[in-house]
């Protein structure tokens, strides 16, 4: 594949349109460049840590970027990091994360399941527990509400368990786990060990949500093996034909 077309791991930025404050959901290994992108829109100026960070879980693609807040790099000062209780325990107990906390580069703010957190006056975020491989921490999705719209950020889940419609009820835009297109991209692997809903198994359902359900479905978190990473692939075309899409870097939604 053309190296220029390789995408960065998925994350979501939030901007308060009045104050200009910026938050980021998940700190990926590409955190600095993604933060630059977040700060460079809407007249922001690049540099410095965000107003806060919200983490879904302790898998490397979702929190490793916190390292950049350390003294050798961005040198954050008491940057709020919203986490679930086991995630806080994990960060407090293991280096190099424990030092980030001890040196007050970050302040861990514990969330409770389903209890909304206010980010300023205009954005609220509700952590929703998600079934996923929870070796090190629990996993959450975030339902994010502004004055007029509601979105869901759900990068990892083991299975929809026939409850997809419940997950996206009342949500205008749902960014959903699109890790694998189908089992055929994983030859020789024990499939039970890597649960994720396969796009091909759920495309009709995604399509119904997009078409009649009022939820705009966008797939994120694509594994490098996923043929839909290539927008010219037949799989990407099948997704588009279903009225669903693979999320693109920099896409924006007004809340
Ligand atoms: Zn994960
Ligand atoms: Zn993940």
Image (tube, rainbow, N blue to C red):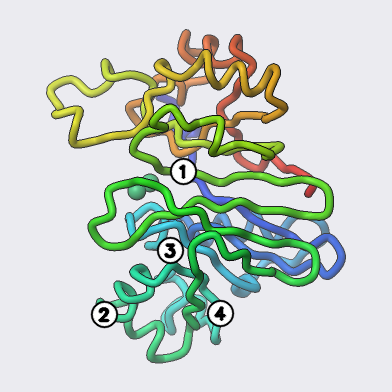
- Mark 1 near ligand 2 (CB under 8 Å)? yes
Distance Cα–Cα, label 4 vs label 2? 19 Å
Q: Residue at x 40, y 20 (%)?
A: 227
Q: Secondary structure at mark 2?
A: helix
Tag 4 residue: 79
Kindly indicate whether the residue at mark 2 contacts the one at mark 3 (C-beta within 8 angstroms): no
Q: Which residue is mark 3?
A: 65
Which mark sits nearer the N-terminus, 4 or 2? 4
Q: Where's residue 68, x and y in %? A: 45, 71
Q: Label 4 to label 3, Cα distance in Å?
A: 13 Å
> In the image shown, does 33 or 212 lie closer to the viewer?
212
Q: Judge the density around disc 1: few (<14), some (14-19), many (≥20) Cα neighbours within 10 Å.
A: many
Which of pointers 1 and 3 indicates the residue nearer the eye?
1
Residue 162: percent from left, percent from top? 43, 27
Question: How far is the residue under mark 1 from the one under mark 3?
Answer: 16 Å
Sequence-first disc among 2 and 1? 2
For marks 3 and 2, the one nearer the N-term is 3
Q: Which residue is mark 2?
A: 93
Q: How many numbered marks, from 0 up?
A: 4
How far apart are labels 4 and 1 at the CA level?
23 Å
Q: Are marks 2 and 1 in contact (CB under 8 Å)?
A: no
Neighbourhood count class around disc 2 (C-alpha, 10 Å): few under 14, some 14–19, many 20 upward: few
Residue under pointer 1: 155
Going by the image, does 197 lie left or right of 107? left
Which is nearer the N-term, disc 4 or disc 1? Answer: 4
């Amino acid at each position: 594949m053309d190296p220029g077309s390789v995408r960065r791991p998925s994350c979501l930025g939030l901007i308060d349109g009045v104050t200009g404050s910026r938050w980021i959901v998940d700190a990926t290994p590409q955190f600095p460049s993604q933060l630059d992108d977040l700060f460079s829109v809407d007249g922001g100026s690049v540099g410095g840590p965000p107003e806060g960070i919200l983490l879904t879980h302790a898998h490397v693609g979702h929190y490793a970027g916190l390292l950049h807040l350390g003294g050798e790099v961005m040198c954050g000062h008491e940057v709020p990091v919203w986490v679930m209780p086991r995630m806080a325990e994990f960060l407090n107990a293991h280096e190099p994360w424990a030092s980030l906390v001890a040196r007050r580069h970050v302040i861990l703010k514990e969330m409770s399941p389903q209890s909304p957190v206010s980010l300023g006056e205009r954005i609220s975020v509700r952590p929703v527990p998600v079934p996923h491989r929870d070796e090190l921490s629990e996993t959450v999705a975030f339902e994010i509400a502004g004055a007029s719209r509601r979105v869901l950020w759900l990068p990892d889940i083991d299975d929809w368990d026939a409850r997809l419609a419940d997950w996206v009820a009342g949500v205008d835009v749902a960014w959903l786990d699109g890790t694998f297109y189908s089992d055929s991209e994983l030859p020789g692997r024990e499939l039970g060990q890597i649960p994720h809903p396969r796009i091909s198994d759920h495309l009709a359902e995604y399509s119904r949500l997009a078409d009649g359900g009022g939820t705009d479905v966008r797939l994120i978190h694509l594994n490098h093996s996923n043929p839909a990473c290539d927008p010219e692939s037949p799989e990407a075309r099948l997704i588009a034909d279903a009225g669903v899409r693979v999320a693109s870097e920099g896409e924006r939604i007004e809340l």
